Amino acid sequence: MLGKGFYNTQGDRRIHGVRSKGELMTILQASLEYADGKRDVIVTDDSWNVGAGPINHCAILAGSDFDSRLTEPAHWSKAIVTNYAGTLRGAESPPMAMFERLSPIKTADEPEPGVFVYDFGQNLSAIPFIKVRGEKGKLVRITPAEQRHQQTDRHNNGTGRVNQAGVGKPNYYEYTLNGAGLESWQPQFTYGGFQYLEITGAVPKGCPNPKNLPVVEALQSIHVRSSATKVGSFSCSNPMFNQIDKSIDRAVRSNLAHVLTDCPTREKLGWLEVSYLMGPSISRRYDLSRLYAKITRDIRESQGADGVMYTVAPNYPKFRNGFRYTPEWGAAGIVIPWQLYRWYGDKRILRENFQAMKAFVDYMKNTGKDLIPKAGLGDWYDYGHGKRSGRAKFTPPELTAMATFYRCTRIVSKTAKVLGEKDDAQNYQALADDSVAFRKIIIKPAFETDVKWAKGHYDAIAGRISVDWNKKNGQCSLNVSIPANTTATVYLPAKNGTSVSESGKPVKQAAGVTSLRMLNGSAVIQIESGQYSFVFQYN
């Protein structure tokens, strides 16, 4: 079964900035190992047979149509060998996978006769899953949306039909029944973002059915995203902070695909400023080592011959002006490799990207004037004073372009030192080696807030970093775990250093504590790797 993605959008119901007519083809190498130890390698060649399948329509942005009467092609023919421009290689980023299965939170509404709306209670990147019975040839349409008509401002409380203002239209899924009893289906090559699914051409089980329409036995929303490993967590005593964390995590998960998208609905494009601006935050929750390495490859392969790095990678759309190139977006090609090195200590990623990084800095220099690079969108979506949001209104675009140019130049300089490409590499190597792969950690809990307790962890390359603290009646406790071959600086708002104990001993006598000093009302403690339990009186 073959899908199209952005590779071919010809004939799609809905297109957003990407018009491509790539020839449909497949290339495959499957290595099989059997239980008895034998091996087979299967490759695509002219011995394969091909035939028309049940997918009548497959759009990256506008759903899919499936005719279950055609699951077995009526006619097979020999595959035609064709030329291709790509290179066959294993996927670098984690595969997309199915996670939570959400059922409707209440009985389906019927805002109009014969129209039924299911509410799943949560907006997510998802695909619909349907179980249905009915006569052969009957067609069921499923329309996704993030909201409904008649909702009030800032509240998702509409009671009308689904409103596709946020997801774009036409956008729907259609399933044609084969009439063989209970049938199940979910789309294979597309996904969207929705909280609501509207059904036409069928009725929910238990509803009056005078027209003998197909009967929906079950309808689910299946959350789909990258299978990047979860490596961090957070919780605290303040329910609002926990809810904020949960909401942000859902937004992040819904945009983790084979690129980091800015929405799972109307675009699905890999806008590059999202990737590096969100990278440090997302890395504390998910392992981005493989996904972000793949994104840097997308950037390199999209890079112009003159060194320019565009706003989107892969560079599918043909945008104009600032939407095509702006320094603050292209900077991802320089910042992400450095972030990956800092997070995971992997020099390979720097070596792979070093020439591309240099080329982009050279491009900003060569296309600028008096070391001020060509400006673009600037401080995107700054807002206020009654002006419409969008391009920078209050900050000169040249200022953020210049700041980006400076930052990128500094990173390339530091990268060169790490890779031994400069004469002064020896002088800066020790400094560069120092937050690399969390060899030095700062623990500084926000005791001054009204939060009573909080805890979290991050599984760094060296091991787990964990923090668990609480405060009550002026006394605070802090439990930390620092992995091997790392050190940490701990800030405690204690009245004085003598009031701090570790595992029941005065902190100065505790094993692993290398120094103690007071700074701006806090006890600043240097510790080596290990487990620590601090207790102190809150300042």
Image (cartoon, rainbow, N blue to C red):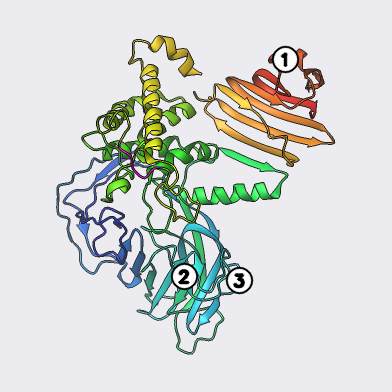
Q: Quadrant of the C terminus?
A: top right
Q: Which mark is residue 195?
A: none
Which residue is farthest right? 473
Range drawn in magenta: 374-378
**Residue extending furthest bottom?**
210
The residue that label 2 is drawn on is 163
Could you say which quadrant of the image residue 300 lies in? top left
- Crowding near the residue tagged with mark 1, few <14, some 14–19, many ≥20 C-alpha atoms within 10 Å: some
Give the structural element (helix, strand or loop) at label 3. Answer: loop
* Residue kind at label 2, given as amino acid type: Asn
Q: Are marks 1 and 3 in contact (CB under 8 Å)?
A: no
Q: Within 10 Å of the Cα at label 2, are there few (<14), some (14-19), or many (20+) other Cα atoms?
A: many
Label 3, on which residue?
106
- Residue receiving disc 1: 511
What secondary structure is marked by label 1? loop
Nearer the observer, disc 2 or disc 3?
Answer: 2
Give coordinates of residue 228: x percent, y percent. Answer: 47, 42
| Residue drawn at x 70%, y 49% as measured from the top left | 239
Q: Position of residue 40 (x, y in %)?
A: 29, 41
User: Which three-letter amino acid code belongs to the residue tagged 1?
Assistant: Ala
Is residue 94 among the parts visible in the rendering? no
**Closer to the N terminus: mark 1 or mark 3?**
3
The reply, left or right, for residue 442 in relation to residue 126 is: right
Q: Main secondary structure of the magenta part?
A: loop
Residue drawn where x is 80% and y is 24% of the image: 495
Give, as a three-letter code, the residue at label 3.
Lys
Residue in view at x 23 percent, y 55 percent: 20
Q: In what quadrant of the picture does the N terminus appear?
A: bottom left
**Horizontal placement of 8 versus 184: left or right?**
left
User: What residue is drawn where x is 32% and y is 46%?
Assistant: 322
Q: CA distance from mark 2 to mark 1?
A: 62 Å
Residue 163 x, y percent position in the rendering: 46, 70
